[in-house]
Amino acid sequence: MTGDTRLGEAGLLARMLPHLATDPRIEVGPGDDAAVVRFPSPRIVVTTDTLVEGHDFLPATTTPSWIGHKAAVQNLADVAAMGARPLALVVALSAPAETPAPVFEELTIALAGRAEADGAYVVGGDLGTSDRLTVTVTALGSLEDDQAPVLRSGARPGDVLAIGSPQLGRSAAGLALVLSGRIRVQDGQVLGADGTTLAEEGHGDLVAWHDAPEPDLALGWTVGRGARAMMDLSDGLVRDGTRIARASGVLLDLDADALAPDVSQLADLAAELGEDPWAWVLHGGEEHAMLATFAAGSVPAGFRPIGRVLPADGEKAHGVLLDGAPIEGTGFDHFGDQA
Amino acid sequence: MTGDTRLGEAGLLARMLPHLATDPRIEVGPGDDAAVVRFPSPRIVVTTDTLVEGHDFLPATTTPSWIGHKAAVQNLADVAAMGARPLALVVALSAPAETPAPVFEELTIALAGRAEADGAYVVGGDLGTSDRLTVTVTALGSLEDDQAPVLRSGARPGDVLAIGSPQLGRSAAGLALVLSGRIRVQDGQVLGADGTTLAEEGHGDLVAWHDAPEPDLALGWTVGRGARAMMDLSDGLVRDGTRIARASGVLLDLDADALAPDVSQLADLAAELGEDPWAWVLHGGEEHAMLATFAAGSVPAGFRPIGRVLPADGEKAHGVLLDGAPIEGTGFDHFGDQA
């Protein structure tokens, strides 16, 4: 890739900035000390999230495009989970000085493209060096004066727990495939580790879903605004459900029958890898689908019921049950022992 | 530090979050998917910047507090340089899993404290693992409807170039001391490399200034609003001046007499290290002071004149001159050859 590297910051930016769309609400875009964006309201919803090479993704099993896509999704999802529509993103990108320019370019195209698909724009950023490719996105949206944010603390006994996704566990299954050493990614194609096409076509889709999940985020700022409580599913149904349960002072009881189809869909692959498909569905993170509770009888299209909200019970501190029984494992924690 | 590590994300956050101040304008603070902040206006000024261990700082020559301070300053400065007052920050912090909890805690206290000193609050963040301590801050401010942002493009021939700092080159001199191997930092004290107190007390101040610069940022959103063009001095007088010159279509002519006191103040140390004090003053970055142009006769208190704005001249593409002559060197570029 000689000739692409050492373009300097200005040269790299010249490769990246033309891929950013403009909008009349962006009064000052990239190129000055800061961006200036006119939001629909002064009540700003803001969140930030980082992807680090070797910790949050493995270069040999993803692509710059998928990294950019995922960096956008995980931040857009946090704004959506407040019931707000994202409008602007800023991106801090750090990478080794010898990183080829097309890596920056492809990542930028995918990140900005995924944001634009939901009506949001990359309005600024920062470019620097690091040992490992690191992408930190900050996403901003706004809420009108009459719009309360949808918090984690609003769940009430009697509510229905629902998820804005037709299939859970895909990201965890894709991660298991990545960690099994059976696959690699080349030119955006998921191949067997020996370079041949995968025997099971669906396995490639699972890896792609893990690397670049595609949840329906618009549920958050449309029908999700009717939720009592909402968050995006980033660290697994049990860990994230526990957050809603604790914030709301309730218990969540998952319905095994409602989750059984998700499990059976992944059962063959789990058996092949010697894994438990229930663990993928219960503890798998990085889906970024909307997890919400609604008043009974009010679950809107796009969400499906997966459990119910019960009164708090001091004996069951865990916060999330499955058909009334405690669940083993705790989901993902960057700084703790893993389930 | 056994017992402090492996607290888990929740345990680390429990050490960090109590140090964040609250404010009525923060409707939702840390703990949900995103923060919600009520700004004075819907025209939001937003910027992001990253510090990476080993690239932007060396652990043996700084402290967690200074890293947090600098991460705040470099972002607050970008908002200030638009003529806006910062109100909210989000912080993405990545570090090795074995990082002692006090590192997170000290960094947070300093970062939040420095922000609060200028009226801004840490309202949210992200915590994850990485090989090297990495801090990405995003800072937000707002502009009222009748307030135009102060851009880099507004400089006009006849303007006075001015800097909101009594002394340039300190950060570069501090960096030279760091890179000389003559000093180390222990318990927040700058010592000689052999652990003894430094012979020259001022040298410690230079290292502290490099690690935790303390520019007068309020100049940006007070008297700086009267500037024709403004930016913060992050990559050196020549490189940043060139950005103003190019954006405005002008030349900047630095006045050697105005900068001579800055140079002479650092001359002894430069001689001792075999360096050129003029290079520190002309190319030294990370001062984060406000660099601005004002209409002749209108330089406000807090700024001092250091040059003038000339009409563009096709022959002198460089953009910045010193007493009418071209300047050698180009300042700092993460992805290019260094001056």
Image (spheres, coloured by chain):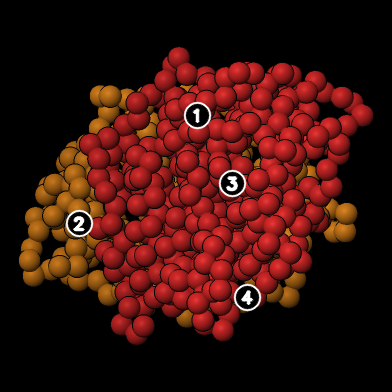
Chain colours: A red, B orange
Query: Relative to residue A213, is residue B11 depicted above or below?
Result: above
- Between marks 2 and 4 in the image, the one whose residue lies nearer the viewer: 4
- Spatial distance from mark 1 to mark 4, Cα to Cα? 37 Å
Query: Relative to residue B188, is residue A261 depicted above or below?
Result: above
User: Residue A3: image x %, image y %?
Assistant: 31, 82
Residue under pointer 2: B245
Which circle's residue, 4 or 3, is located before the other in the chain? 3
Q: Quick check: marks 1 and 4 in contact, CB under 8 Å?
A: no
Amino acid type shown at disc 2: Ala
Secondary element type, mark 1:
loop
- Spatial distance from mark 4 to mark 3, Cα to Cα? 23 Å
Taking the image as shown, residue A110 lies to the left or right of residue A276, namely left
Q: Are marks 2 and 4 on the same chain?
A: no
Residue for point 36% across, 83% down: A1
- Between marks 4 and 3 in the image, the one whose residue lies nearer the viewer: 3
- Between marks 2 and 3 in the image, the one whose residue lies nearer the viewer: 3
User: Residue A171: image x %, image y %?
Assistant: 60, 55
Q: Nearer the viewer, residue A286 or B156?
A: A286
The chain carrying label 1 is A
- Spatial distance from mark 1 to mark 3, Cα to Cα? 15 Å
Secondary element type, mark 2:
helix
The chain carrying label 2 is B
The chain carrying label 3 is A
Residue under pointer 1: A301
Q: Are marks 4 and 3 on the same chain?
A: yes
Amino acid type shown at disc 4: Arg
Residue under pointer 4: A182
